[in-house]
Image (tube, rainbow, N blue to C red):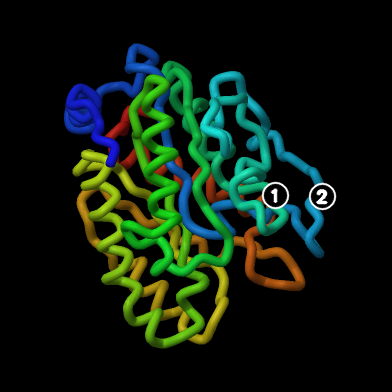
Amino acid sequence: MFVFPLYLSYSYLLICYAGVHLASTAVGKNIFLLSGQSNMSGRGGVVNSTWDGYIPPESSPNPAILRLTANLTWVPAAEPLHRDIDIAKVCGVGPGMAFANYLLRKNPSIGVVGLVPCAIGGTNISEWVRGGDLYKQMMRRAAAAVAGGGTIRGLLWYQGESDTLTLEDAEAYKSRLRRFFFDVREDLHLPVLPIVQVALASESGPYTNVVREAQLEMKLANLKTVDAMGLSLQQPENLHLTTPSQVSLGKMLTKAFLQICHYHHL
């Protein structure tokens, strides 16, 4: 298992606890893991398995935003961020680019933002268990991301639709999700890693409310939950966020992340 150098964890703690600027003087890239299922992967603009190709200004490429590809190399980031990760489905616009652009707009001195797409559509929380393929892939990508110089600043997590289909999964969701968050922090050696999760926007199965309650009631240090309910959904499937909704979600994720790290001056 990859072990983070102590200086990375220590510098990270200084940044979050001292409440100082996340500035260009930080070591390398400011890295964010994007994990979960299809709404994090991005289906904005995808109808009948075809992406319309529209990229809103808020999600446009920025020289200061990079993406870690499937073959673990950094390239300029552009939608769809998950096109070589979530390969079983057609990807469209997700929240990641809007998140990064808004973060840079709030603090231009932040330097380089490195996005690490890891989300896979249709996945149950049980598939993200420590030791499973998805978990190991996320950890492998996280290790590769910091190896090139940088620090993991946060985890953006949007998942749960697949756990609304059976009562058993819905009732187990809270404990499984809590375990996942603890495991990620432990294995990254970042015990106060900021995590921003999204409460479900769509009613995928009959137990959506059970999963939403688990998400909204989750209380952990440096964890924020943003509620996507009410954001517009792609029609006629009524499951995935539209492109404008993904932009709105990206801004919500940014604001929540900044609240965690106490950047109230931004």
Residue at position x 47%, y 45% in the image: 34
Q: Nearer the viewer, residue 47 or 124?
A: 124
Horizontal placement of 48 versus 146: left or right?
A: right
The earlier-in-sequence mark between 1 and 2 is: 2
Tag 2: amino acid? Asp
Residue at position x 49%, y 26% in the image: 104
Kindly report the distance in space between the C-alpha atoms of the residues bearing marks 1 and 2: 8 Å
Query: Which structural element holds mark 2?
Result: loop
Residue 105 picture location, percent across and down: 52, 26
Horizontal placement of 25 versus 79: left or right?
A: left
Q: Is residue 217 above or below residue 10?
A: below
Residue 180 picture location, percent across and down: 30, 59
**Label 2: how many residues lie within 10 Å, few (<14), some (14-19) or many (20+)?**
few
Tag 1: amino acid? Gly
Horizontal placement of 4 versus 82: left or right?
A: left
Asked if the residue under mark 2 is in contact with the one under mark 1, i.e. CB atoms within 8 Å, the reply is yes
Q: Nearer the viewer, residue 193 or 98?
A: 193
Reading the image, the residue beneath label 1 is 92
Write down the quadrant of residue 220 in the picture.
bottom left
